[in-house]
Image (cartoon, grey):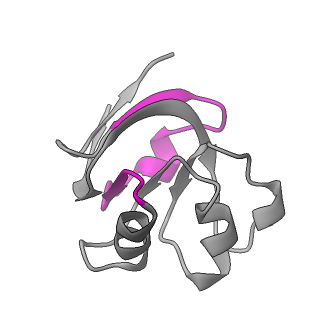
Amino acid sequence: MLKGLPASNGIIEGIAKVFLPGDDAKEFPQDAIMVTTLTDPTMVMAMMKASAIVTDMGGITSHPAILSREMGIPCIVNTKLGTKLIKDGQRIKVDAITGEIYDLD
């Protein structure tokens, strides 16, 4: 479905939540897969609830990459179209070893 740059190794399946800068971190569901353009420090509370992170932009030294490694969760950055192709509630598989994201619906 989509490919990006693996930034924190791991494989997980779960429900996607598109979360954009300015969204309320309190509303982010526990264990959802965060799909966003790029994280920033205001999103850390939501990131701590995430089971994985997928971003449109970024590299291996970007904010989501560093924090996901610190938190021990899978992360794929630089998908370019993640927020366009992945929908809220969509069941996906994040393979942050190969950098591939699969649609499970």
Of residues 31 and 59, the one drawn nearer to the viewer in this rendering: 31
Query: In the figure, is residue 1 to the left or right of 44?
Result: left
Q: Quadrant where the N terminus lies?
A: top left
Location of residue 69 (image quadrant):
bottom left
Going 74% across and 46% down the picture, which residue do you hit? 29
Residue under the image location 75 percent in, 66 percent down? 23
**Residue 101, percent from left and from top:** 33, 36
As drawn, which residue projects farthest toward the bottom? 41
**Residue at the image position 74 percent from the left and 54 percent from the top:** 28
46, above or below 95, in the image:
below
81 or 70: which is nearer to us?
A: 70
User: Looking at the picture, how far across and down is residue 79, in whole percent?
Assistant: 32, 54
Seen in the picture, residue 104 relative to 64 is either above or below; the reply is: above
Q: How many marks?
A: 0
Q: Is residue 58 left or right of residue 24?
A: left
Question: Vertically, is 70 above or below 53?
Answer: below
Q: Does 76 appear in magenta?
A: yes
Task: Identify the residue at the far left of this view.
Answer: 98
Measuring from the top left, give residue 95's x and y in whole percent. Answer: 29, 38
- In the image, residue 76 lies at what x, y percent? 33, 54
Q: Is residue 60 magenta?
A: no
Q: Quadrant location of residue 61?
A: bottom left
Question: 5 left or right of 75?
Answer: left
Which span is picked out in magenta?
72-94
Between residue 91 and residue 51, name the one nearer to us: 51
